[in-house]
C-alpha cells in the first residue's frame, strides 16, 4: 500500500487508537465489555499514558490511522555488572486486515529503531499465533530463560 506514513502518536490520537484496539482484541476473542464503555475507558488510558511514559507509532494512509504499535520501557533493578537496566515491552501491534502486507513490519522496525538508541537489555512481547513469523523475521527468538505464571484473576475468562 503506497503513501503510508509512520509517525509518532500524540495524546490527541486516543479515540482513534482505542477503536483500533477494540477491533484488534475483538478479533482475538469475544468482547465482554460494551464497546462504547471500552472505547471511553481505553481512550482515556491511552491519552494519559502517552502524555506520561508510553511511546507509540501509527501507520497513516489518506489521513486515516490503519495500524499502531505501543512500547513501554520497564526499569530493572540496578546492576553492578554493566548489564543494561531497562527492558523494552512491545504491545498492541495491529494493522487493519485490509491494509496488511508490510505495514506491521514498518511499525515494528520504527519501534525497534527507537529502542536501539536506549540502554535496553531485552525486548519482550506476547505475540498472537498469526504474528509470530513477523517477530521472528525481525530477530526475535523464543527464550529459554523466562518463566511465566498466569493468575486466574488475570487470565482470559474461560467458561
Image (cartoon, rainbow, N blue to C red):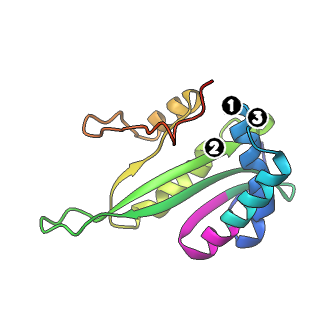
Marker disc for residue 29: 1
Answer yes or no: is residue 53 visible.
yes
Residue occupying the far bottom of the picture: 51
| Residue 143 versus residue 46 in the image, above or below | above
From the viewer's perspective, tell me whether residue 76 is left or right of residue 45.
Answer: left
From the viewer's perspective, tell me whether residue 82 is left or right of residue 49.
Answer: left
- Separation (CA) of disc 1 from disc 2: 20 Å
Task: Report the residue marked by disc 2.
Answer: 104
Marker disc for residue 97: 3
Q: Secondary structure at mark 3?
A: helix
* Mark with earlier residue (1, 2): 1
Location of the N terminus by quadrant is top right
Location of the C terminus by quadrant is top right
Q: Where residue 105 sits: x, y (%)?
A: 59, 43
Q: Nearer the viewer, mark 1 or mark 2?
A: 1
Q: Residues within 10 Å of mark 2 (few under 14, many from 20)?
A: many
Q: Secondary structure at mark 1?
A: loop
Answer yes or no: is residue 3 visible.
no
* Residue at (79, 51) in percent of width and height: 19
Q: Which residues are magenta?
A: 47-57
Kindly indicate whether the residue at mark 3 contacts the one at mark 2 (C-beta within 8 angstroms): no
* Residue at (64, 60) in percent of width and height: 57
Q: Where residue 23 sits: x, y (%)?
A: 77, 41
* Residue at (55, 49) in percent of width and height: 91
* Mark with earlier residue (1, 3): 1
Q: Residues within 10 Å of mark 3 (few under 14, many from 20)?
A: few
Is 49 colored magenta in this rendering?
yes
- Separation (CA) of disc 1 from disc 3: 16 Å
Q: Where residue 4 sits: x, y (%)?
A: 75, 52
Residue occupying the far left of the picture: 81
Amino acid at each position: 500500500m503506497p503513501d503510508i506514513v509512520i509517525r509518532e502518536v500524540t495524546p490527541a490520537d486516543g479515540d482513534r487508537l482505542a477503536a483500533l484496539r477494540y477491533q484488534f482484541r475483538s478479533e482475538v476473542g469475544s468482547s465482554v465489555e460494551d464497546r462504547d464503555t471500552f472505547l471511553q475507558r481505553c481512550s482515556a488510558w491511552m491519552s494519559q499514558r502517552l502524555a506520561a511514559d508510553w511511546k507509540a507509532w501509527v501507520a497513516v494512509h489518506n489521513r486515516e490511522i490503519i495500524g499502531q504499535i505501543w512500547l513501554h520501557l520497564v526499569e530493572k533493578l540496578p546492576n553492578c555488572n554493566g548489564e543494561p537496566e531497562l527492558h523494552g515491552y512491545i504491545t498492541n501491534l495491529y494493522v487493519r486486515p485490509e491494509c496488511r502486507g508490510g505495514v506491521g513490519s514498518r511499525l515494528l522496525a520504527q519501534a525497534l529503531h527507537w529502542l536501539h538508541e536506549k540502554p535496553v537489555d531485552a525486548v519482550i512481547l506476547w505475540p498472537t499465533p498469526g504474528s509470530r513469523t513477523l517477530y521472528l523475521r525481525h530477530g526475535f527468538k523464543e527464550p529459554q530463560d523466562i518463566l511465566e505464571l498466569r493468575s486466574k484473576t488475570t487470565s482470559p475468562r474461560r467458561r
